[in-house]
Amino acid sequence: MSFLMRSLAWLLAAAVTFATLGPPGLRPHSDLGQDGEHALAFILIGLAFGLAYRRRRLAIAALSVALIGLLELMQFWAPGRHARLEDFVVDALTACLGFAFAAAADWAMARFGARTVASESPAE
């Protein structure tokens, strides 16, 4: 399962990198608007990486914020793209929110999953 989650996280990161730095005409568009698209993409990034790298979640979250900043700065050299502080803030905050959702999911599974397993064991 870990290999699958890590593969999914990295494929998602590659897709977001292409959408961020690739030709504007090839970038997918939706009815969410630019901030909504950024929020959805990066909340999924945070969730995927948060579930894929559970033991290093805080370090990966910090590294993700740094790489999101680098990705935004790289747009200065990408033709037809623009780097904006607003995009960085939306991307970084929603990625952190995705990491928080991953931590909450782990907490809920540990808390309620253990209770389910304990209640299914035979009584002595």
Image (cartoon, rainbow, N blue to C red):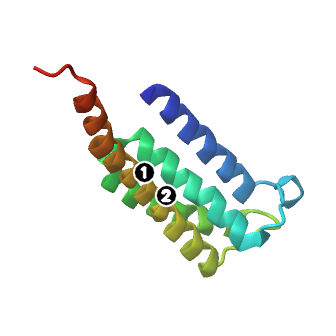
Q: Position of residue 113 (x, y in %)?
A: 32, 37
- Residue 22 appears left or right of 109: right
Name the one closer to the observer, 11 or 33.
Answer: 33
Q: CA distance from mark 2 to mark 1?
A: 6 Å
Name the one closer to the observer, 55 or 70.
Answer: 55
- Residue 92 appears left or right of 83: left
Name the kind of residue labelled 1 in the image.
Answer: Ala
**Where does label 1 land, which residue?**
102
Name the kind of residue labelled 2 in the image.
Answer: Gly
- Residue 101 appears left or right of 68: left
Q: Position of residue 5 (x, y in %)?
A: 50, 34
Q: Position of residue 44 (x, y in %)?
A: 58, 52
The quadrant in which the C terminus is found is top left
Query: Is residue 100 at all visible to an observer of this figure?
Result: yes
Name the one closer to the observer, 47 or 78.
Answer: 47
For mark 2, give the secondary structure: helix
Q: Which mark is residue 25?
A: none
Identified at 70% across, 69% down, the residue is: 36
The quadrant in which the N terminus is found is top left
Identified at 68% across, 46% down, the residue is: 15
Identified at 66% across, 52% down, the residue is: 16
Q: Which mark is residue 98?
A: 2
| 38 up-or-down from 45: above or below | below
Q: Find out whether the residues at labels 2 and 1 contact each other: C-beta distance under 8 Å.
A: yes
Identified at 62% across, 80% down, the residue is: 86
